[in-house]
Image: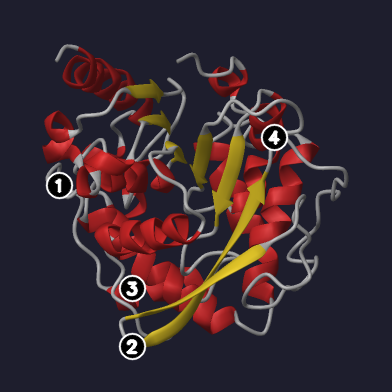
Amino acid sequence: MRLPAALTALSLIAVSSATVAIATADDGPAYGPQLEGFDYPWPVSRFSFSSQGESLEMAFMDVKPVGPANGRTAVLFHGKNFCAATWHDTIASLVDAGYRAIAIDQVGFCKSTKPAHYQYTLQQLAGNTRALLASLDVTRPIIIGHSFGGMLAMRYALTFPGDVDRLVLVDPIGLEDWQAKGVPWQSIDTWYQLELKTTADSIRAYQRATYYADTWDEKYEHWVQMLAGLYRGPGHDLVAWNGALIDDAAFTQPVYYQFEQISVPVLLIVGDKDATAVGKNFAPPAIRSTNPSACSRKRLATTCKLFFTR
């Protein structure tokens, strides 16, 4: 099976029809706790279910092929600082190529429920997603995951190996255990205080340094304002609290030690300028000075060996 060539580009940050000009200070829209007021490029459906004693909803877009269908379904997992809508261009390319594309907002993110009390494990998020896909009669999809979503995609494949056709991982986190490298653990309360300080300026600065190699294009601002609008809105505290719980999960649950147990084919895409490192702001100077890009190149070679030489 040949994946569409568009996946090798994966226009994660391409903007939809409207572009928001770069704001000054923290000016900009305020959205509801489930991103009410921010429009997605396709209709949003909701999967209602109960988990850990909470009534929850997961928002998703289920986009059908625009031409002859090839009978395959691609399921897209967003990263920590993104939403299902961020996959806009990739979804468009997939449906043009005959795929059904399902882009999901995980619990705690974007248009999905943000519970006041929830134990975020990658297995739990994988289980939630499997239940959503079962409700749609989707079996053995191709799973495409970016960043935190790539980490979740690997955990999904490890937890439900018979329910995945293959993985596409785009700059996934979880390829290192930063705690084992010496980055100190932080309490959820510490993460929460950091999340409470999130603004458009802090999001923009982080994304410029981490994702875009200290460059910037106005089209990226659309996604900055999407995220910043959640923190400006009436759900600010709940958004920050869920963000803190997810930060803790990302830091403490690497899949680094189980690569060899992933049994499905994997396409791994890693940018050599990707500077993502979970908890790097807490790292001691000697570790902080380590170039994450060099780590990316090293982890790419190591991971490819594990994934592709079986």
Q: Quadrant of the C terminus?
A: top left
CA distance separating discs 4 and 1: 47 Å
For label 4, the crowd category at 10 Å Cα-Cα, with few meaning under 14, some 14 to 19 and many 20 or more, is many
Q: Is residue 277 visible?
A: no
Nearest to the eye among marks 2 and 1: give it: 2
CA distance separating discs 2 and 1: 36 Å
For label 1, the crowd category at 10 Å Cα-Cα, with few meaning under 14, some 14 to 19 and many 20 or more, is some
First in residue order: circle 4 vs circle 1: 4
Instruction: Determine which residue is flagged by label 2.
Output: 53
Nearest to the eye among marks 2 and 3: give it: 2
Instruction: Determine which residue is flagged by label 3.
Output: 190
CA distance separating discs 4 and 3: 44 Å
Query: As rendered, which of 286 and 206 lies closer to the eye?
Result: 206
Q: Is residue 193 above or below residue 44?
A: below
Q: Is residue 197 above or below residue 89?
A: below
CA distance separating discs 2 and 4: 37 Å
Amino acid at circle 2: Gly
Instruction: Determine which residue is flagged by label 4.
Output: 65
Amino acid at circle 4: Pro
Q: Residue 271 at x, y = what percent?
A: 46, 23
Q: Residue 87 at x, y = what percent?
A: 63, 41
Classify residue 219 by image quadrant.
top right
Residue 182's disc is: 1
Q: Is residue 202 visible?
A: yes
Say left or right for 211 vs 272.
right
- Under circle 1, the secondary element is loop
Q: Is residue 272 above or below residue 196?
A: above
Amino acid at circle 3: Thr
Amino acid at circle 1: Gly
First in residue order: circle 2 vs circle 4: 2
